[in-house]
Amino acid sequence: MTATTITFYPLLGMASDLAAAGRYDEAAQQVIAHLRSHPEEPQGLAKLGEIAMRLGALGQAEHFLRRALAAGGRDIEIRRFLASVLDQQERLTEAGELYAALDQEAPDPRLSALRAHILDKLGRNAEARTIHEQLTRDSAYDPRQWIALGNSQRAAGDVDAAIASYRHVIARDEDFGEAWWALANIKSKVLTDDDVAAMQKALAIAIDIRNIAPLHFALARALHDRSRYAEAFDHYKQGNDLRAVDIGYDARELSAEVAEIEHAVDAAFIASLDQRPIGDAVPIFIVSLPRSGSTLLEQMLGSHRAIEAVGELPYAPAILRSVMEMATRRGQVTVPQLVASLSADQAAAMGQDYLRRAAMHRKTDRPFFIDKLPHNWSNILFIRRILPQAKFLDIRRPAMDCCFSNFTHSFSSAHAASFRLADIGQCYADYVRLMAHLDRVAPGLVHHIDYAALVDDAEPHLRGALAHLGLEWDPSVLEFHTLDRVVRTPSSEQVRRPLNRDGMEIWRPYAEWLDPLRATLGALAE
């Protein structure tokens, strides 16, 4: 048997130390110096790929990791990093296959969990749930696995089982904030007075922000349910303040993006875009801010005989991110500039890529399908370029309700605007500005639906939406709560009930503390 020789390279050691300290640019310089002396050395290429991944340069990360493998790199970590990059690029089939191969080669519960994560993202809930159940049964206790199982159970409508999974974590780790938030985020009021006392005790001893922030949100939700609004707001604010400092969101960037579209995109720009459809399927993009009723509208329209609801697909922003990464290597590029520069073949290839990825989520051959990723409101121009047949429905919740609902939700960094009242207000204002501009330069491109009016009297607004889509009326859309499907959003319980006014004017008990939001919204506030 031949022993494997591992060579230590001092510059790579320095690079690893710098990367561990978050000094990625300096780490990359050390690796580049190493590769000048040792061209195509696998460890160096792999380290450069890892650093690029940490910096979010996913295309470059994939390039260097594949070069490392081609140069003879055998370390399993290289393929794990590559799988992670593919996952972050939303190339889910490729990522899932690589995770599965690695798990078979070197069985590891963490790899099994990543396989389940991919299956969940693909909408293959039953397969993911089987893996989650196996991991919680056969592997060492890991609270994240129990929460993942609970999330899978909740998405499938098995709320009692989800509650049991979350409480299993709390019984073992009383200060595990994510489990408390998972319970609080269930629409029925499941938190008891004993739970309130337990969360207060946990907050007194918690030291990790990953526990403290969601604990604040969960405790605030429980206090809200008890009409203790001043205390609830205090905890909402503390949780949001922690997340805002951690993320460092700058609202001016989104405002500048919208201003650039207002400046660069006119009626002639829209008229210059190709009209020929890509493929046979017609994607319907429901766009909005989060917490605006998009899940309800999707559930309604998904009950139509010609429409399939497939959830929130990450592919449009992932494709845009990849092409922007390539374009900006040559200098700064805005989205309107990118859209104008795409050739017909390039745009068609991107549209086909989107449809190919979306097809992995489809279970029927209905001619229309819904992608309800809310953040696509800022991607409409790009989507229209690569998918000329796409339809857009904007569902808009009243500003104060929408913004405050976002503020009370423990979001991930994907919706970083939600953590300060002024920031979420500015995000709403920018969204309204963009919709108004598109109405001026491309009348009829986006059909608008008022959430409050939809809840009060659904039929006329659904008829209008179906007319925009070119579809006939189907009374099944009014029986939306009977549709049996997995719903992976915070509204998963609500859309399984008939229409109701829950959540309307939820901001009013907090009115005295919302001046920063009102000031930013201006006339948009009630």
Image (tube, rainbow, N blue to C red):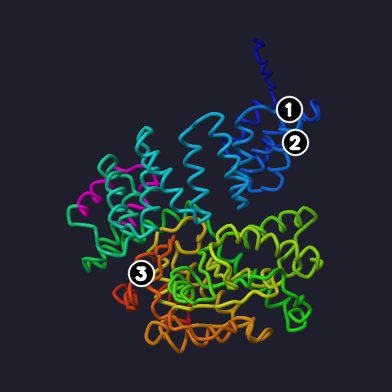
Image point 65% across, 69% down: which residue? Answer: 257
The image shows residue 115 at horizontal and vertical percentages of 51, 43
The image shows residue 405 at horizontal and vertical percentages of 39, 69
Q: Residue furthest left?
A: 194
The image shows residue 106 at horizontal and vertical percentages of 54, 29
For label 2, the SS is helix
Q: CA distance from mark 1 to mark 3?
A: 53 Å
Q: Residue furthest top?
A: 1
* Residue ID for mark 1: 72
Q: Is residue 184 above or below residue 297?
A: above
Residues in magenta? 195-218
The disc placed on residue 505 is none
Q: Quadrant of the N terminus?
A: top right
Determine whether, in the image, residue 272 is placed left or right of residue 353.
right
Answer with mark 1 or mark 2, whichever residue precedes in sequence: 2
The image shows residue 156 at horizontal and vertical percentages of 39, 58
Q: Is residue 324 above or below residue 68?
A: below
Answer with mark 2 or mark 3, whichever residue precedes in sequence: 2
Residue 21 occupies quadrant = top right
User: What amino acid is at disc 3?
Assistant: Arg
Work out whether residue 204 or residue 74 is closer to the camera in this orientation and state it. Answer: 74
* Residue ID for mark 2: 67
Q: Residue furthest bottom?
A: 460
Residue 216 occupies quadrant = bottom left
Work out whether residue 112 or residue 18 is closer to the camera in this orientation and state it. Answer: 112
Image point 52% across, 87% down: which residue? Answer: 464
Image point 55% across, 59% down: which residue? Answer: 361
Check contact, mark 1 vs mark 3: CB within 8 A.
Answer: no
User: What amino acid is at disc 1?
Assistant: Gly
**Magenta segment, principal secondary structure?**
helix
Work out whether residue 133 or residue 274 is closer to the camera in this orientation and state it. Answer: 133
* Residue ID for mark 3: 496
